[in-house]
């Protein structure tokens, strides 16, 4: 494969996917058969500035360039060659948030990320106006909150987009967005696969008294579906990626997408009755629907697949951060004993031992709220562990309680889909850091959702691979297939997956845990109010 991959790179037939995650920017290079052949990464962190979570534009471009330089180094090490031309490029990033620019392409206020929860008043008013759940983190919520706050920059907005849309624009000059990412800015009509026209009209009437020189559609990126042409890499764009000057302009770019869409693609979950769960720093589930829900729910976001199918999304701000912190504590204890630390072994031993705990965790409770959690109506979080004197306080129960906590809020949202809306799924595929220890996170999630959970061998490649697949779909779909057909035939054919059915005792135990968890939220709220 080494000689074949080298030839692919040198002939300009490789495809590049880059995704901006919350803590890591990752690049994946794939061959004509959509197999990863090289990768690069860059670690970064958001900053709290003036009370809002942000990444500076300098950090964005330095991160992209360092990630690509890391990819180039990997290519030189593996194949002793340089990347000069690419068959296609895809850009993906965290969805939602607020990036507003004036007519000179200057950013008007620092990038406001999905993590900010200061948009409550705007989201509530828009949800009522649209008769549709508008989450706090959506771009339209950020825009309207800025209007409610009378922020002076709003009158100067010429373009409003997401992080993926911004990077794509700077690389190609095109103000476009994949329909999946666009559906996290403003609701999309699945019939037209475009922004909902009636909601745009309602919004324009709402803000008309302000006298802004723009209407909403004029400042939004064009929403386009997977497979469509989204522009080509300009000379300036090539230099913004590769400061060494090797990368040539001209490569086509696919529509930029959000991390939710690339996760669906990377797990082959774009058909109705399929779904996926991503569980890392934050978590979300995506269930592709056969029909719309009977009514709006304020804990369920309605977005779309990259090809425009309706998706019910349950998004949780918190997942593994508190779990990782507890594992770090055991690491410190091991270091105190003078025992060499292998973090994979520490995680493996603790996670596997958790399966020996009682199905209901022996009465123990954990709340993993590093930040606020909209689904449980908390604008701030306090990580907390709770038990009574009579509970069974063992290491196995303790770790099981923390593993349960990592997907507890996800369960609350999905219980609505499965128990109230009677949504049916044929397959849910899981990916992310929670599932690195084989079988443990998978069995916990199966119990939480009372559904079989699959883990693919390739799911660990993540969103950068997912956006590379979307770029490949644009240039290699010679048969004119739909996105699901292309993924089945050209990507996942012959791929193996491990499926785990829910254990009835674990399901009953998780249900008992979640009942205590919901009752105990009053304690978490008190901690927020008093600590």
Image: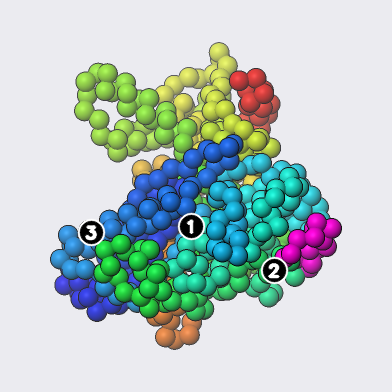
Task: Give the structural element (helix, strand or loop) at label 1.
Answer: strand
What residue did someone put label 2 on? 217
Dot 2 falls on a residue whose secondary structure is helix
Q: Which residue is mark 3?
A: 74
The answer for how far apart the CA atoms under marks 2 and 3 are is: 42 Å
Q: Specify whether 223 is left or right of 282.
A: right
Q: Tell me which corner region of the image, top left, top right, bottom left or bottom right, holds residue 465.
A: bottom left
The circle drawn on residue 499 is: none
Above-or-below relation of 200 to 483: above
Identify which residue is drawn at 50% across, 67% down.
169
In the picture, the quarter occupied by the N terminus is bottom left
Magenta part of the chain: 198-214
At 48% from the left and 85% from the top, the residue drawn is: 480
- Asked if one can make out residue 473 in the rendered structure from this viewpoint, the answer is no
Q: Earlier in the sequence, mark 2 or mark 1?
A: 1
Tell me whether the residue at label 2 lies in contact with that at label 1, contact meaning CB atoms closer than 8 angstroms.
Answer: no
Measured as percent of width and height from the top left, residue 291 is found at 69, 66
């Amino acid at each position: 494969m080494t000689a074949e991959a080298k030839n692919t790179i040198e002939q300009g037939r490789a495809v590049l996917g880059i995704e901006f995650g919350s803590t890591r920017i990752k690049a994946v290079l794939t061959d004509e058969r959509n197999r990863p052949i090289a990768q690069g990464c860059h670690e970064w962190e958001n900053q709290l500035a003036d009370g809002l979570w942000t990444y500076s534009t300098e950090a964005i471009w330095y991160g992209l360039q360092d990630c690509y330089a890391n990819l180039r180094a990997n290519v030189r090490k593996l194949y002793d060659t340089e990347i000069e031309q690419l068959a296609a490029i895809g850009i993906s990033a965290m969805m939602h948030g607020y990036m507003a620019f004036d007519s000179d392409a200057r950013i008007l206020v620092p990038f406001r990320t999905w993590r900010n929860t200061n948009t409550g008043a705007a989201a509530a008013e828009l949800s009522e106006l649209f008769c549709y759940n508008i989450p706090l983190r959506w771009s339209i919520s950020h825009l309207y909150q800025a209007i409610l706050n009378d922020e002076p920059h709003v009158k100067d907005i010429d373009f409003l987009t997401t992080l993926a849309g911004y990077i794509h624009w700077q690389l190609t000059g095109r103000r476009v967005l994949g329909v999946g990412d666009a559906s996290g800015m403003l609701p999309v009509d699945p019939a037209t696969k475009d922004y909902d026209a009636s909601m745009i009209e309602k919004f324009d009437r709402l803000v008309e008294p302000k006298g802004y020189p723009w209407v909403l559609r004029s400042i939004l990126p064009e929403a386009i579906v997977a497979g469509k042409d989204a522009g080509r890499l300009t000379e300036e764009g090539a230099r913004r990626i590769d400061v060494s000057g090797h990368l040539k302009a001209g490569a086509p770019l696919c529509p930029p997408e959000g991390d939710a869409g690339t996760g669906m693609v990377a797990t082959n979950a774009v058909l109705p009755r399929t779904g996926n769960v991503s569980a890392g720093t934050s978590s979300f589930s995506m269930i592709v629907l056969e029909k719309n829900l009977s009514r709006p729910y304020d804990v369920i976001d309605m977005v779309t697949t990259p090809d425009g199918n309706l998706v019910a999304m349950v998004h949780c701000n918190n997942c593994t951060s508190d779990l990782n912190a507890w594992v770090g504590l055991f690491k410190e204890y091991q270091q105190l004993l003078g025992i060499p630390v292998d973090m994979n072994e520490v995680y493996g031993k603790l996670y596997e031992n958790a399966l020996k705990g009682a199905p209901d965790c022996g009465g123990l409770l954990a709340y993993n709220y590093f930040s606020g959690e909209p689904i449980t109506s908390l604008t701030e979080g306090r990580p907390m562990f709770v038990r009574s004197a009579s509970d069974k306080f063992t290491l196995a129960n303790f770790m099981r309680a923390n593993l349960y906590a990592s997907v507890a809020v996800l369960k609350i949202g999905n219980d609505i889909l499965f128990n109230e809306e009677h949504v049916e799924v044929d397959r849910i595929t899981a990916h992310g850091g929670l599932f690195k220890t084989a079988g443990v996170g998978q069995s916990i999630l199966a119990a939480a959702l009372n559904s079989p959970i699959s883990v693919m061998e390739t799911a660990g490649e993540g969103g950068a691979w997912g956006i590379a697949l979307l770029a490949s779909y644009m240039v290699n779909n010679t048969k004119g297939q739909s996105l699901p057909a292309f993924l089945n035939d050209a990507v996942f054919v012959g791929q193996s997956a491990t499926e785990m059915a829910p254990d009835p005792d674990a399901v009953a135990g998780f249900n008992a845990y979640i009942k205590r968890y919901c009752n105990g939220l009053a304690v978490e709220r008190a901690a927020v109010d008093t600590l």
